[in-house]
Image: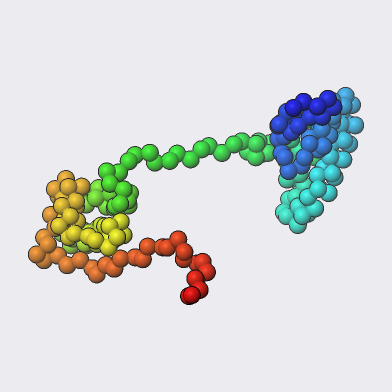
Amino acid sequence: MNIPGLDYNTQREKLIMPEYGREVQKMVDYCMTIPDRKERLNCAYTIIDTMLRMNPHLVQTDNYEQKLWDQLAVISDFKLDIDWPVDVSKAKVMAEKPQPIAYETSRIPVRHYGRMVFELFDKLKTMEPGPERDELTALTANQMKRDLVQWGHGLADDEKVADDLARFTDGKIQLDLNHFKFERVSAMPVPSANNGGRKRKKK
């Protein structure tokens, strides 16, 4: 619905630093149109005073004046032509958007073991036989057993652990169930939807 004389934020130009609001943005835009260089600088000082009144807590921070002038440079999109009282060249770092973090997109064959266990599988495939590999094998097998217990509601089969361990290490690790002893694993209680709620009164 369009009403004459009214505009909406969604229709306005996007603010560079929304925390200072549209009025400060307008002040900066006006400042850039002032033809006289000295008057332009005086206007910039007035804007800095306004920004400080809006954020008085900045006084308690180190180099607060530098931060304010840096912010003014950012708001003006570095187009404000004045004799800057401080060096604002590093303010461009503030204006740069951080690069998106790359997420791991590779999939694992079975979800219940998790990515960490598959990293252990890869490590085991590269290790030579010996005490160190035996120790990592035991750690991996017990973690697999815990994962199976958690995902299988308390049911886990030792042979399945041995089979999966051999399969996902390309046959490098063969668990001898006649000699290998798993750690005791107890099933974790499944949270109930009523946990934390009020107890029903007995009738």
Coordinates of residue 169 in the picture (x, y in percent): 19, 48
Coordinates of residue 159 in the picture (x, y in percent): 15, 57
Above or below, 110 against 153 in this view is above
In the image, taking residue 139 as reference, residue 66 lies left or right, namely right
In the image, taking residue 123 as reference, residue 46 lies left or right, namely right
Q: Name the residue furthest bottom.
A: 202
Q: Would you identify the image quadrant in which residue 26 lies?
A: top right
Above or below, 65 against 32 in this view is below
Do we see residue 115 in this rendering? yes
> Going 72% across and 40% down the picture, which residue do you hit?
18
> Going 77% across and 47% down the picture, which residue do you hit?
65
Looking at the rendering, in which quadrant would you find the N terminus? top right
In the image, taking residue 63 as reference, residue 96 lies left or right, namely left
Do we see residue 82 in this rendering? no
Q: Identify which residue, 136 or 40, lies in the foreground.
A: 136
Above or below, 89 against 63 in this view is above
> Going 74% across and 33% down the picture, which residue do you hit?
9
Coordinates of residue 106 in the picture (x, y in percent): 34, 39
Coordinates of residue 132 in the picture (x, y in percent): 21, 60
Above or below, 184 against 55 in this view is below
> Going 52% across and 69% down the picture, which residue do you hit?
198
Q: Name the residue furthest left.
A: 178
Q: Identify which residue, 120 or 64, lies in the foreground.
A: 120
- Colouring scheme, one of rainbow, by chain, secondary structure, one colour: rainbow
Q: Would you identify the image quadrant in which residue 130 lies?
A: bottom left
Q: Identify which residue, 86 or 57, lies in the foreground.
A: 57
Q: How many marks?
A: 0
